[in-house]
Image (cartoon, rainbow, N blue to C red):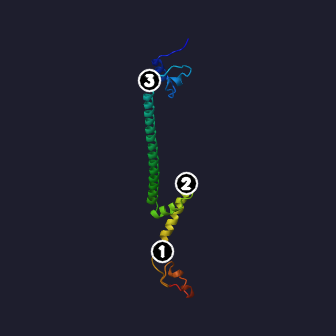
Amino acid sequence: MTDHRSEDEDELLLHESTTPLVLSREVAFPSLHVPVSSTATQQTAPQQQISDSTFQLFTSYFDSKISALKNENLISGLVLKLNKRNKLIRIADKSPACWTTVREYEREEIASDSDDEKRLSQAESRALKTIKEKKSRTKPCYECHLFGHWNSNCPNRSSKQYTPRK
């Protein structure tokens, strides 16, 4: 009792197989020594085309997914930059020192985010201090005509006695 299958049954077994690597009758049934007909070799060519087209579909699908992920990463990076910029604009709007506070705030980016409020208040105080120093140094000393101090604090005046008017 030998088990001989027709070519139609072999083709049906190939299509129902769960492993796509089974392409010929010799591989599927190694115990059967049936001569290979020309129709069996013709059946492998369409299967090869199907596997090639399937591979191309998978590669194009995954390439599109990869490019979508790259675009998503790019968009998320831009959103983070916009959020940071908007935060700096809000800080500049609320602070009396305006953009000087923002410059001082950005200079100290090494600290952690948990100290954000503390850093902001320190940056604002430094900014106000620099603004006050710039305003106070607009005119030179009346005694030595140098910038950086007032007439009452002039180092050249210390040798002379200062008598305030009454």
Disc 1 from disc 2: Cα separation = 34 Å
Callout 3, which amino acid?
Answer: Ser
**128 and 80: which one is in front?**
80
Residue 113, label in figure: 2
Q: Write the residue at 44% across / 57% down.
A: 89
Residue 57, label in figure: none
Disc 3 from disc 1: Cα separation = 101 Å
Which mark is first along the chain, 2 or 1? 2
Q: Which residue is mark 3?
A: 38
* Residue 85 placement (x, y as % from top left): 45, 56
Which mark is first along the chain, 1 or 3? 3
Disc 2 from disc 3: Cα separation = 74 Å
Tell me if label 1 and label 2 are in contact, CB under 8 Å. Answer: no
* Residue 134 placement (x, y as % from top left): 47, 72
Query: What is the crowding at mark 3: few (fewer than 14 residues within 10 Å), some, or many (at least 20)?
Result: few
1 vs 2, front mark: 2
2 vs 3, front mark: 3
Q: Write the residue at 46% across / 19% down.
A: 7
Callout 2, which amino acid?
Answer: Asp
Regarding mark 3 in the picture, which secondary structure is present there?
Answer: helix
* Residue 12 placement (x, y as % from top left): 46, 20
Which mark is first along the chain, 3 or 2? 3
Regarding mark 1 in the picture, which secondary structure is present there?
Answer: helix
**49 and 155: which one is in front?**
49
Residue 136, label in figure: 1
Determine whether 100 is above or below 73 in the image: below
**Is residue 90 at least partly visible in the picture?**
yes
Q: Quadrant of the N terminus?
A: top right
**Is residue 97 at least partly visible in the picture?**
no
